[in-house]
Amino acid sequence: MATAKEICDTVLKYVKDEYVEDEDQELTCRTPLISGGIVDSFSMVSLKRFLENKYKIQIPDAQATPEAFDTVDKIAVLVQSLTDRKN
Amino acid sequence: MAFTDAVRSGFQKELEGLRAAGIFKTERFIHSAQAADIEVEFPAGAAPKKVVNMCANNYLGLSSHPEVVAAAHAGLDSRGYGMSSVRFICGTQDIHRELEGRMTEFLGTEDTILFPSCMDANAGVFEAILNESDVMISDRLVHASIIDGIRLCKAERDTFKHADMEHLESKLELHAARRLKVVITDGVFSMDGDTPPLDEMSRLCEKRGALLFVDDSHSTGFIGRTGRGTHEKYGVVGKVDIITTTFGKALGGASGGCVSGRRELVEMCRQRARPYLFSNTIAPVVVAGVLRVLDLISKSTERRDKLEKNAAYWRKGLTSAGFVLKEGDTPIVPVMLFNAKLSQDFSRDLFEEGIYAVGFFFPVVPKGAARIRTQISAGHETSHLDKALSAFIKVGKKYEIHR
């Protein structure tokens, strides 16, 4: 099972490739993604799909909230909780 | 009273916050008809000042054209002022249906339905034709009215990087299982004046079984060899499934918009689009004016040709003077200043020099990308553009931003 650090690194790379236009923009696991305007609410679906495919999980709509997706750290917590449940 | 002092104070604080953030909008009052030369009261209370208008969407210079004004007068006399009804009760005149037919012919589509505005067309169209089984995949820079329309629709939402066809294809692949996939873009993006590659986009949509939606509000009447729009420019007339556009810009500039495209999709809008169902349509006087606009631009390309020539002349002049422009070939010519305060100071000084052009900065455009957006018109003569260029050079020297 992936560690929190591995999940953070993978998700951070995906977010940079998918959403960040400015290569100089600094992005860490604690950068606000949704409330910081990096990922808009219309684009969240791709991130959700990516996580579901990558970690073979289903994220219930009730848990796929802008708050739960707001930082890479929070996303890692969510992914770990769902993979734990699966295992 | 529900609007208590505390409630009032809350709103006052919110408004003060907008002022403090520099995003509080004010209007400038124009004391003349819309044209290249206008008289503007600014600031409020000042004597009206004669300025060259470089910020209207009056691309073809038809907003106050004598023949359009005369046709509107005749329409007012023959069809009256208002309809006092929505379309499907008793709010449809022969000229409304005539305009729908004329737009269908002009755009090379199958059918057209009028809306009170293109904002309404975009707000109503997606909900009318899509459901939970579908997906809307929009360019990340589409107009705010499209974003509102997407929000009102239950279909799934996704986006692709601006005009990035590789990214769009990956999204079409991701959503392959959806019943309907709609790719959504502007024809001309109004802040940068660029156009997406509709030919490639159309090919991708065919390959991946998606519908193509284009908002051509900043194109209809002048982009493409005969001014039909971006679908003409990219050789995909008949291949765009849904076009929305406005009568509030090049086509006389009064008001109103439409959805034009596949017959069944237009009919779905007639049955289900809420802004069509629950609002009066375009006033007869405006319909009569737009019909005359279509007469004028269908019989000759003179005005769009002049616009193209003017835009090229303006771009060349600014570039030669050392200004940095957003590249493009549309009449939207953004002069990049990068700094938000500079864009406001520059605009104010231009006004002093008799040139009306507005500065845009974050959040309307990305941080560090502040600019003066200039918009060229067929109503401009070379003398207008020369005067504007002299003013840009003079103000540019003041701020030491041109070579």
Image (cartoon, coloured by chain):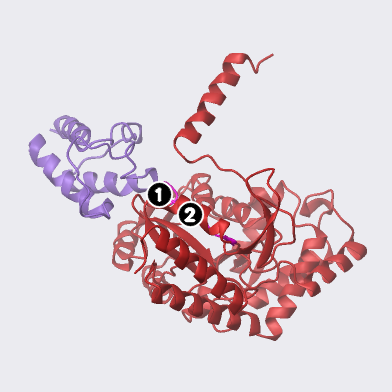
Chain colours: A purple, B red
Circle 1: element type: helix
Chain to which mark 2 belongs: B
Q: Looking at the rendered structure, which numbered label has been put on residue B359?
A: 2
Disc 1 to disc 2, C-alpha distance: 8 Å
Q: Residues within 10 Å of mark 2 (few under 14, many from 20)?
A: many
Q: Which one is in front, B338 or B139? A: B338
Q: Which one is in front, B249 or B387? A: B387
Residue, x 43% and y 65% (percent of image)? B210
Residue, x 60% and y 82% (percent of image)? B306
Q: Is residue B179 magenta?
A: no
Q: Is residue B319 left or right of residue B79?
A: left
Circle 2: element type: strand
- Say if residue B70 shows up in the picture: yes
**Residue B337, position as x, y percentages in the image:** 38, 58
Residue bearing mark 1: B340
Dot 1 and dot 2 within a common chain? yes
Say whether disc 1 or disc 2 marks the residue closer to the N-terminus.
1
Q: On screen, B95 above or below A52? A: below
Residue, x 34% and y 69% (percent of image)? B403
Q: Residues within 10 Å of mark 1 (few under 14, many from 20)?
A: some
Amino acid type at mark 2: Gly
Amino acid type at mark 1: Ala
Q: Which one is in front, B368 or B259? A: B368
Disc 1, disc 2: CB below 8 Å?
yes
Q: Looking at the rendered structure, which numbered label has been put on residue B64?
A: none
Q: Which residues are magenta?
A: B354-364
Q: Quadrant of the N terminus of chain A?
A: top left
